[in-house]
Amino acid sequence: MHGMEVHTAVEYAAPVTFVVFNNNAHAMCAVREEFLQGGVRSDDLFARTDLAAGVAAAFPSLEVTGADDAAQLRQALLRSNAGGGPAFVALDCDPGRSPRSFPSSPSPKPPRTPPRTRRAQLNEESSTLADIPGLMRIENPGKEELTAHCMELTHAVYPHHQVYGQYCTIHAYVDCPPERAYDYLRQGHHLEEWTCSLRDFAPAGPPGLWVGHDRLEDDTRIYCEVVANPEAMTVDYHCSWDQGEKLWMIYLMRVVPARLVLDKPGSVITWTNCRHPYYDDNPHPGAAPRPDRPWVGDYWDLFYAGHTVEMNNLKAILEHRHRNGLPVNVAPPTAVAR
């Protein structure tokens, strides 16, 4: 845990709980065994900590809880996680005491179930999974170890590249019926309304293929084909800069009835992009309007921000027209082959 993580959690009211142990490794391992594996029992393993006082002084708005033993730690974590904001659980392992099930010397690990026995515990239906490495299912490590692993994967702060380096997904609730939102998205000429820079679409020749301009860069053509599924309410925009033979920039969108997932009217719209290798290496540099024209992949780190702006545009248009009883769709400026 880093001080900056605590500061960030407090600043943004992140729903996280920080736990601090002292540096007595033996006692710390013991409590981890008891708390995470549930197989070790001992009384009065911990002395009352005074770390809470220091944390409370540094972060007055942070809820601070002290714990004496693994049972209290468990309860403190449950209370803290239910609070909805950042919290701090302070725990001081007593170096002068060891759990009875962990002799001071030597310090053997508690017996563990052999792998073959674990596999034998799998039910018949899942037995074909036993030899697949890396699986974590409730039948394998058990509930507490699985929960502990999930806790280790949960952080207050995530680097941008870790979240959006290879995939960029955004989502929004829109107060507009899902059928109307889907019908708006499936008609590609509406891209000229809600995107920041796609304009002037016209038929490109083959039915369903359009060509327009991406004003993000001067004299840059963008080709687009819409692939929609009315039953699943998915709308995928297959696009590319400069050429229309291979459409590799795929914008994956889905409209979900909000009644199903949020129990209220309206739509939930999701939008995902995957980092195709061409984002990092222009496959057709000769098709660019000029040699020094920046490439679309140069903007990947801004995809989350840029797409969020565009999703907000989409939300504003759909909600305004629906709220005011206006037609959601508009006619295309250019007749397009269906």
Image (cartoon, helix red, strand yellow):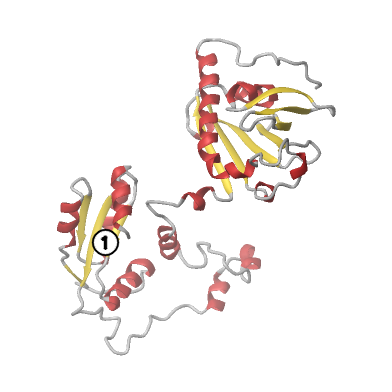
Question: Can the viewer see residue 161 in this picture?
Answer: yes
* Quadrant of residue 133 within the rendered picture: bottom right
At 29% from the left and 78% from the top, the residue drawn is: 26
> Dot 1 lies on which element?
helix
* Quadrant of residue 318 within the rendered picture: top right
Give left or right: position of 289 versus 298. right
Residue positioned most to the top:
325
Residue 55 at x, y = what percent? Answer: 20, 56
Residue positioned most to the right:
206
Residue 297 at x, y = what percent? Answer: 63, 44
Residue 137 at x, y = what percent? Answer: 53, 62
Q: Amino acid at mark 1?
A: Leu
At 17% from the left and 65% from the top, the residue drawn is: 49
At 25% from the left and 81% from the top, the residue drawn is: 100
Nearest the eye: 277 or 97 = 277
Q: For the residue carrying disc 1, how many other residues have a C-alpha within 10 Å: few (<14), some (14-19), or many (20+)?
A: many
Nearest the eye: 203 or 107 = 203
Q: Which residue is mark 1?
A: 73
Question: Can the viewer see residue 226 in this picture?
Answer: no
Nearest the eye: 252 or 310 = 310
Residue 35 at x, y = what percent? Answer: 33, 67
Q: Where 273 falls versus 153 (above or below)?
A: above
Q: Quadrant of the N terminus?
A: bottom left
At 53% from the left and 35% from the top, the residue drawn is: 306
Q: How many marks?
A: 1
Q: Quadrant of the C terminus?
A: top right
Q: Where 60 falls versus 271 (above or below)?
A: below
Nearest the eye: 135 or 170 = 170
